[in-house]
Image: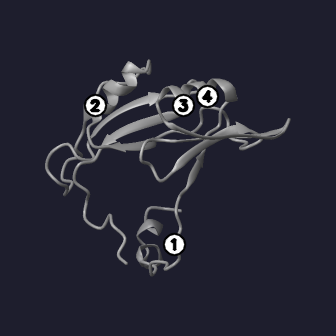
Protein backbone atom coordinates (compact mmCIF):
# COMPACT_ATOMS: atom_id res chain seq x y z
CA UNK A 1 0.00 0.00 0.00
CA UNK A 2 1.38 3.44 -0.85
CA UNK A 3 0.28 6.86 0.35
CA UNK A 4 -2.11 7.34 -2.58
CA UNK A 5 -3.99 4.16 -1.55
CA UNK A 6 -4.94 5.78 1.74
CA UNK A 7 -6.80 8.55 -0.07
CA UNK A 8 -8.76 6.47 -2.57
CA UNK A 9 -12.52 6.97 -2.85
CA UNK A 10 -13.32 3.50 -1.52
CA UNK A 11 -11.40 4.04 1.70
CA UNK A 12 -13.09 7.38 2.45
CA UNK A 13 -16.67 6.38 1.69
CA UNK A 14 -18.74 6.03 4.83
CA UNK A 15 -20.79 2.91 5.33
CA UNK A 16 -24.27 3.26 6.80
CA UNK A 17 -24.27 2.83 10.56
CA UNK A 18 -25.43 -0.58 11.66
CA UNK A 19 -28.80 -0.81 13.39
CA UNK A 20 -27.71 -3.83 15.43
CA UNK A 21 -26.90 -3.05 19.06
CA UNK A 22 -23.40 -4.22 19.96
CA UNK A 23 -21.74 -3.46 23.26
CA UNK A 24 -18.09 -3.96 24.03
CA UNK A 25 -18.56 -5.91 27.23
CA UNK A 26 -15.22 -7.52 28.09
CA UNK A 27 -11.57 -6.96 27.21
CA UNK A 28 -9.13 -9.83 27.67
CA UNK A 29 -5.87 -9.06 29.48
CA UNK A 30 -2.87 -11.36 29.10
CA UNK A 31 -1.27 -12.08 32.47
CA UNK A 32 1.41 -14.47 33.66
CA UNK A 33 0.15 -14.98 37.22
CA UNK A 34 -3.64 -15.04 37.63
CA UNK A 35 -3.63 -14.71 41.42
CA UNK A 36 -1.15 -11.80 41.36
CA UNK A 37 -3.35 -10.01 38.78
CA UNK A 38 -6.45 -10.74 40.86
CA UNK A 39 -4.81 -9.16 43.91
CA UNK A 40 -3.74 -6.11 41.90
CA UNK A 41 -7.12 -5.40 40.31
CA UNK A 42 -8.91 -5.98 43.62
CA UNK A 43 -6.56 -3.40 45.19
CA UNK A 44 -7.74 -0.81 42.64
CA UNK A 45 -11.21 -0.92 44.17
CA UNK A 46 -12.77 -2.40 41.05
CA UNK A 47 -15.84 -4.62 41.36
CA UNK A 48 -14.90 -8.29 41.53
CA UNK A 49 -17.35 -10.17 39.30
CA UNK A 50 -16.22 -13.79 39.13
CA UNK A 51 -13.39 -16.27 39.48
CA UNK A 52 -14.58 -19.26 37.46
CA UNK A 53 -12.38 -22.34 37.42
CA UNK A 54 -13.63 -24.62 34.64
CA UNK A 55 -10.67 -27.01 34.62
CA UNK A 56 -6.94 -27.12 35.30
CA UNK A 57 -6.47 -25.44 31.92
CA UNK A 58 -9.30 -22.88 31.94
CA UNK A 59 -9.95 -20.16 34.51
CA UNK A 60 -11.62 -16.76 34.08
CA UNK A 61 -11.38 -13.87 36.51
CA UNK A 62 -13.41 -10.74 35.81
CA UNK A 63 -13.34 -7.23 37.29
CA UNK A 64 -15.23 -4.09 36.32
CA UNK A 65 -13.92 -0.54 36.84
CA UNK A 66 -16.31 1.70 38.84
CA UNK A 67 -19.38 2.63 36.76
CA UNK A 68 -17.93 1.08 33.58
CA UNK A 69 -20.04 -0.77 31.03
CA UNK A 70 -16.97 -2.80 30.03
CA UNK A 71 -15.14 -5.32 32.21
CA UNK A 72 -11.73 -6.95 32.03
CA UNK A 73 -11.07 -10.68 32.10
CA UNK A 74 -7.87 -12.57 32.60
CA UNK A 75 -7.04 -16.09 33.56
CA UNK A 76 -5.68 -19.34 32.28
CA UNK A 77 -6.47 -20.56 28.79
CA UNK A 78 -8.10 -17.22 27.89
CA UNK A 79 -5.71 -15.73 25.34
CA UNK A 80 -2.50 -16.55 23.50
CA UNK A 81 -1.27 -12.95 23.74
CA UNK A 82 1.95 -12.37 25.65
CA UNK A 83 1.53 -11.17 29.24
CA UNK A 84 1.85 -7.38 29.33
CA UNK A 85 1.08 -6.91 25.64
CA UNK A 86 -2.20 -5.02 26.18
CA UNK A 87 -1.30 -1.34 25.91
CA UNK A 88 -3.18 1.94 25.79
CA UNK A 89 -6.27 0.74 27.65
CA UNK A 90 -8.10 3.99 28.37
CA UNK A 91 -10.03 4.70 31.55
CA UNK A 92 -12.05 7.90 31.13
CA UNK A 93 -12.29 9.96 34.33
CA UNK A 94 -13.84 13.34 35.09
CA UNK A 95 -10.87 14.42 37.25
CA UNK A 96 -7.52 12.89 36.35
CA UNK A 97 -5.80 14.40 39.40
CA UNK A 98 -8.33 12.80 41.78
CA UNK A 99 -8.16 9.45 39.95
CA UNK A 100 -4.36 9.55 40.06
CA UNK A 101 -4.39 10.37 43.79
CA UNK A 102 -6.81 7.49 44.46
CA UNK A 103 -4.60 4.99 42.64
CA UNK A 104 -1.46 6.26 44.38
CA UNK A 105 -3.21 5.85 47.75
CA UNK A 106 -3.77 2.21 46.74
CA UNK A 107 -0.07 1.67 46.09
CA UNK A 108 -0.09 2.06 42.30
CA UNK A 109 2.82 3.79 40.56
CA UNK A 110 1.09 6.40 38.35
CA UNK A 111 2.85 8.86 36.06
CA UNK A 112 2.54 12.60 36.46
CA UNK A 113 -0.41 14.17 34.63
CA UNK A 114 0.56 15.32 31.15
CA UNK A 115 -1.52 17.82 29.15
CA UNK A 116 -0.83 17.69 25.43
CA UNK A 117 -3.08 19.34 22.84
CA UNK A 118 -2.13 18.62 19.23
CA UNK A 119 -1.68 21.88 17.29
CA UNK A 120 -4.60 22.89 15.08
CA UNK A 121 -7.04 20.35 16.53
CA UNK A 122 -10.62 21.63 16.74
CA UNK A 123 -11.72 20.58 20.21
CA UNK A 124 -13.28 21.99 23.36
CA UNK A 125 -11.10 24.37 25.32
CA UNK A 126 -9.49 23.14 28.50
CA UNK A 127 -8.05 19.76 29.38
CA UNK A 128 -10.85 17.47 28.22
CA UNK A 129 -9.27 14.60 26.22
CA UNK A 130 -5.77 16.05 26.63
CA UNK A 131 -4.94 15.51 30.32
CA UNK A 132 -3.62 12.00 30.89
CA UNK A 133 -1.65 9.89 33.34
CA UNK A 134 -0.60 6.27 32.98
CA UNK A 135 0.11 3.15 35.00
CA UNK A 136 0.74 -0.54 34.43
CA UNK A 137 -0.39 -3.74 36.09
CA UNK A 138 2.24 -6.18 37.45
CA UNK A 139 2.54 -7.83 34.01
CA UNK A 140 3.09 -4.54 32.19
CA UNK A 141 -0.36 -4.15 30.64
CA UNK A 142 -0.60 -0.38 30.14
CA UNK A 143 -3.49 1.80 31.28
CA UNK A 144 -4.17 5.48 30.55
CA UNK A 145 -6.31 7.74 32.72
CA UNK A 146 -7.87 10.27 30.34
CA UNK A 147 -9.77 13.27 31.64
CA UNK A 148 -13.00 13.90 29.71
CA UNK A 149 -15.29 16.63 30.99
CA UNK A 150 -16.80 17.77 27.68
CA UNK A 151 -17.48 15.21 24.95
CA UNK A 152 -16.63 15.94 21.34
CA UNK A 153 -19.66 16.23 19.03
CA UNK A 154 -20.96 12.97 17.61
CA UNK A 155 -20.05 10.85 20.65
CA UNK A 156 -23.65 9.87 21.48
CA UNK A 157 -25.71 7.28 19.61
CA UNK A 158 -28.95 8.55 18.18
CA UNK A 159 -32.07 6.46 18.77
Q: Which mark is residue 127?
A: none
Is 52 or 109 nearer to us in this picture?
52
Tell me, yes or no, whether the two marked residues, 4 and 3, touch with CB atoms within 8 Å: yes
Q: Farthest residue in the left direction?
A: 125
Q: Which mark is residue 37?
A: 4
Q: Give above or below for 155 relative to 20.
A: above
Identify the residue under disc 3: 41
Q: How many neighbours does mark 3 have within 10 angstroms: few (below 14), some (14-19), or many (20 or more)?
A: some
Q: Give above or below for 6 relative to 46.
A: below
Local secondary structure at mark 4:
helix
Local secondary structure at mark 2:
helix
Quadrant where the C terminus sits is: bottom left
Q: Give above or below for 109 relative to 59.
A: above
Residue 131 is situated, as x and y percent measured from the top left of the image, at 26, 38
| Residue shown at the point (61%, 40%) measured from the top left | 29
- Is 126 situated left or right of 72 in this image? left
Identify the residue under disc 2: 98
- Is 114 situated left or right of 80 in this image? left
Residue 24 is situated, as x and y percent measured from the top left of the image, at 53, 58
Image quadrant in which you'd find residue 110: top left
Local secondary structure at mark 3:
helix
Of marks 3 and 1, which one's residue comes earlier in the chain? 1
Amino acid sequence: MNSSDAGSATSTELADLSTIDMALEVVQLPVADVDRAKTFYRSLGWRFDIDLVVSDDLRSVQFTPPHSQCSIQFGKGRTTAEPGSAQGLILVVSDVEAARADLISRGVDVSEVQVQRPPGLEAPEGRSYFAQASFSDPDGNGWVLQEVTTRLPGRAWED
